[in-house]
Image (cartoon, rainbow, N blue to C red):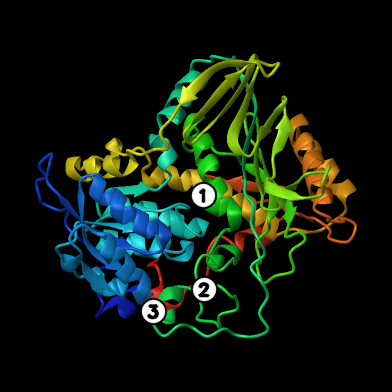
Amino acid sequence: MSHVKINRRNFIKATAAGIGAVMLPSGKAWGANDRINVAVIGCGNRGRSHVRWVESSGGSVLAVCDPDLHHMEAAAKIATETDKVRRYQDIRKLMDDKDIDAVVIATPNHWHALATIMACQAGKDVYVEKPASHSIWEGRKMVQAAQHYNRIVQLGTQQRSDPALIELKKSIANKELGEVEWIHSIWYAKRQPIGKVSGPQTIPNYIDYNLWCGPRKKVPLMRKRFHYDWHWFWDYGNGDMGNRVIHTIDDIHHVMQMEDNIPHKMMAVGGRFKYKDDAQTPNTEIILMDWKVPIIFGSRDLPFIYKETGKTGGPSVYNRFGKHFRFTNLIKCEQGFFAVTRNGGVVYDNTGKRIRKINGDGGKTHMRNFLDAVRSRKTEDLRAPIASGHMANLMLLTGNISYRCGKPTTTADVAKSMQFCEESSESWKQTVAHLADNGVDLNLEKPIIGPWLNFDAKHERFTGNTADMANSFLRETMRPEFSIPDNI
C-alpha cells in the first residue's frame, strides 16, 4: 500500500481511505538539558496545569491548541514566554508545525486516540491524558501507531511514577503480607446533578463546535455546561469510572504486574440514582473482574449522609476494618491489607492495626519521565507506555460495556450476582445502605445489572452468549473528516 502524510490538505481523503503516513524517526540528537518544544492540545483546567508542568519539567511550551479560543488564550498566558506561544484552533494545522517536537493531549476522551495517532503520523511524541482511549478498537490503534512510527507515547496515569505505587508493587511481589486474596479499588466523589435542558443550547461563538465534536456526530448541544459535563455522556466520556477510577484501575494493572494477563470475565452493576438530569453515565457503579483473585472497582458520586442529622457531608465512604475509605486500593492479603494509592497509604494487619506507612508524591516526576524518554528515544524508559496503558484501560472499557449491555433488575437479583466473593457482597450491602441514606428507593429506581462477559484479550473481542451486543461497543462510528485509519 502507498502512504501519504496526513496534513490539513489531505486529512479528509487519507483518513477516509484508511491510509496512514510514513514518517522517518526524528534524527535529532537530544542533549541531556535540551529544551523540547511542546504543544498542549486541550486547554481546560487540566491542559493549563500541563503548561506549568511541562515548563517545570524541562520542556518549553511552544504552542497551544483548543477549539475554544478563550481556553486557548488562557493557557497561552500561563506560559513563560506568552508572546512567543503559537495559537492553533485547528489541531490539523498544528500537526503541520515542524518546530513542535511533542504534544500533550488533554482533550475530551473521544479525541484522545485520533489526536495521538495524528501526532505519531506527524513525527511528534505524545503524552496523552487518561483514559488512554474512548473505545477498545481505537486504543489498539494508538499502540500500533506508536510502534509503527517509532514514537514515544506516555499515558497520563501519573501514579505509575508515584514512589508509593512503585514500593507497593515490590511489597506484593515479595509477599510482605503473604498471598493476595482479593482487591477492591475505590474512588468516591461528591457530584451535583448537571441539570436538565428543554432544548438545544447555544454554542458560544468563540468555540468551533465542529472541531470539538471531531470524530463524533455533530449533534445539538443538550447540556447546560459546555465544558467538563461531557464526561457524563457516552459519546464523549466514560463516566467517573473513566474520569477518576481509571487511576486506581491502572494502579492494579501496575502493582499486580498484569501485563497481557488481564481478567477474561467481568460484569457491572449500578445506575444514575436520585438525579433527574441530562447525564447518561451512572453515578454509582461497581465492576467485578474474575481474575486469579477477585477484583472490584467502585465509584460513587452521591454524598455521605450523617444519619444523626440527615445533613449531607463530603463524598461517601467505604466502611470496613474500622476505617473510612473513599479513595484507595484495598489489597487484602493473608496477613493483612494494603490501603495505598496516590500520595501513599498504610499497611495494616488483619485487625486493622497500622504496621507502617508508605510515602508517595503524587507522581510529580511523571512529565519529566516522558521528556527524558523523548531524549533517550527508549520506550522502555517510560513508566506508563501506551501499550501497558491500553491493557489497563481494557478493564475500564469492558466493565462499562457490561453495564451498557445491562437491564433493570431487583436488588435480590443483584445480591445473588454480588456473591461473587465475600468482598463484593459487602460492597453491595454498603452501597444499598448508602443509596437508602440518600433517599433512593431501589424498588422504584431499579439498579442496572450487566451480564457476565467473556473477553478474549488476545483478539480483543467478546465471546459467548452476549458477544454480539458487547462487540457492538468495541468500535464507534466516526465522521469521515475525523476518522482513524484501519491500517496504521
Depth order, front residue of 122/429: 429
Judge depth for marks 2 and 3 and give the one in front: 2
Q: Is residue 151 visible?
A: no
What residue sits right under mark 2 in the picture?
A: 226
Q: Residue 316: which disc?
A: none
Q: Residue at x 10, y 50 (%)?
A: 28
Badge 2, how many Cα within 10 Å: few under 14, some, many 20+?
A: some
Quadrant in which residue 352 is drawn:
top right
What residue sits right under mark 1 in the picture?
A: 459
**Residue type (three-letter) at the residue carrying disc 1:** His
Quadrant in which residue 466 is drawn:
bottom right
Q: Mark 1 near mark 2, Cβ–Cβ under 8 Å?
A: no
Residue 101: image x %, image y %? 19, 56
What residue sits right under mark 3 in the picture?
A: 481
Badge 3, how many Cα within 10 Å: few under 14, some, many 20+?
A: some
**Residue type (three-letter) at the residue carrying disc 3:** Glu
